[in-house]
Amino acid sequence: MKFYKYQGAGNDFLIADNRDGALRLSPEQVARLCDRRYGVGADGLMLLETSDRYDFRMVYYNSDGSGGMMCGNGGRCIVAFAADRGVRNFEFEAADGYHCAEILSDDGVVKVVSLKMTDVKNVTEYQALAGIQVPSGGYFLNTGTRHYVRFVDDVEHCDVVSEGRQIRYASELMPEGANVNFVEPCGDVLKVRTYEKGVEDETNACGTGIVASCLAAWSSRAMEPQHIGPDRFRYDVRAKRDALAVEFTQKDDMLAADVWLTGPAAYVAEIIVNI
């Protein structure tokens, strides 16, 4: 079986073209392929499949084999993959519904992809989470995946893994749990680090988490965004190594509409594996 490895801001994925419907993967097979020591290694795995309504369908799995959620960096990477397979229009369905995308630039390896995310209706503030041994006041919202956002003074020195794991399993967020984002407003940039459930570790970037972090910053006024048009706003974001941006429109009946996530998506390798 042929897979292709792509990375979006260091968030890496195995992707297969399954438009013929021939590939069926169990959660155990996905986890084995994504294992960084016994498999190929990746934060997640995606299948490009046909859709009855749109140009294609994105099927996403976490590295532990779980699925049923949206991945923002994965969405940008599957658009880059689809383009490399000859697809020219990028309207697609994912676990959280309809998406579309634009490729803003392409140097043959790295594409800059702008992906339309789901609208976000509201955010829930928590002063604290029960039974957590670390500071846990923050904000919960769903950007296609469940996220908890906590603002910190020094994100570089946060213990993202241990603190993130505690918050991820907090009783208020169970049974589904949530990804956990640690966010520092720094000048005109939001610095974001994320602990991802399903990976159960920090990843180099999380697209839905970056969107959640920006909207939490907007809702809490932790950092003012750039005003780029009538009721239209933008945040610039720094993940562990790469820069991304989030743009959105404020509407009275929801927190954010017409939300777009922009950043790099790069081809890494072609891989042949035995399933």
Image: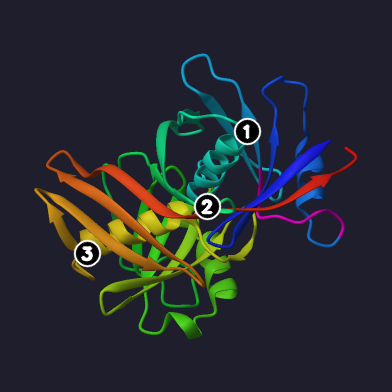
- Residue contact between numbered discs 3 and 2, judged by CB atoms under 8 Å: no
Residue linked to disc 2: 177
Q: Nearer the viewer, residue 208 or 173?
A: 208
Q: Amino acid at mark 1?
A: Arg
Per the image, label 1 sits on a secondary structure element best described as: loop
Whether residue 227 sits left or right of residue 148 in the image: it is left
First in sequence, mark 1 or 2: give its number: 1
Q: Position of residue 122 (x, y in %)?
A: 26, 46
- In the visual, does 39 lie left or right of 260? right
Q: Which residues are magenta?
A: 38-45
Q: Quadrant of the N terminus?
A: top right
10 Å crowding of disc 3: few (<14), some (14-19), many (20+): some
Between 73 and 81, the one lying in front of the other is 81
Q: Is residue 265 left or right of residue 1?
A: left
Along the viewing direction, whichever of 126 and 64 lies nearer the viewer: 64
Residue designated by label 1: 85
* Residue appearing at x 76%, y 56% in the figure: 41
**According to the image, label 3 marks what residue?**
220
